Amino acid sequence: MLLQTIAISALTAYIDYKTGWRAWSINIAIPIMIMIANSTMLVLTIVSHKKYIKYVIFQLIIVIFSMLPVFLISEHLVQNKILSMIASGMCFINFIVCLVLCTKDIKETLIRKFHI
C-alpha cells in the first residue's frame, strides 16, 4: 500500500506538471491518495490487529508521508486547504486508533527486539 501511494502520487504530480501545472495533483489527488492509504491501513488494523506488527513500519511511513499536505499548506502551495487538512487529520486519527488497538503487541515487540 505504501509503494502504491507514493508511486501514484508522484505519477499524478508528473502528469500535472506535463499538462501545464494547474496544481490539481497537490490540491486533490495527493490528499485523496493519503485518505485512501489511511483508510486501508485502518481496515487492515481492525480486521487483523493481531498481525499489526507486520505493517507497523508502513503505518509510520504513511504518517510521515501524510505530513506533505501540511507542508504544502504552510508553503502556500495549496488552494484547497480543507481537503489537505482532512487528509492529515484522518492520518493522525488513524495512527491513534492503531496505537490504541495494538498497544500490547507493539510493547511486546519493542521489548523483544530492543530488550527493554
Image (cartoon, rainbow, N blue to C red):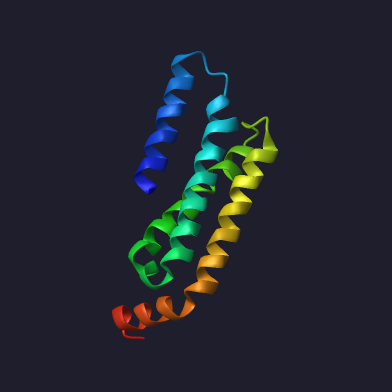
In this picture, residue 20 sits left or right of residue 4: right
The residue at the far front in this view is 47
Q: Nearer the viewer, residue 90 or 51?
A: 51
Q: How many marks?
A: 0
The C terminus: image quadrant: bottom left
| Picture residue at 49% right of the left edge, 54% below the top | 63
Front-most of residues 50 and 31: 50
Q: Residue furthest bottom?
A: 116
Q: Is residue 8 above or below residue 19?
A: below
Q: Quadrant of residue 6?
A: top left
**Residue 16 shown left or right of residue 80 in the figure:** left
Query: From what the image shows, is residue 107 above or below residue 41?
Result: below
User: Which x, y percent locates residue 65?
Assistant: 47, 48
Residue 64 placement (x, y as % from top left): 48, 52
Q: Residue at x 36, y 69 (%)?
A: 51
Pick out the residue farthest to the top.
Answer: 20
Q: Horizontal and vertical percent for residue 23? A: 57, 24
Quarter of the rendering containing residue 60: bottom left
Quick check: 26 above or below 103?
above
Query: Residue 37: x percent and y percent?
Result: 47, 48
At a point 53% along the width and 18% down the height, the residue shown is 21
**Depth check: 28 or 67 in front?**
28
Q: What residue lies at 53% left-to-right and 32% top-to-bottom?
A: 29
Q: Is 106 above or below relative to 33?
A: below
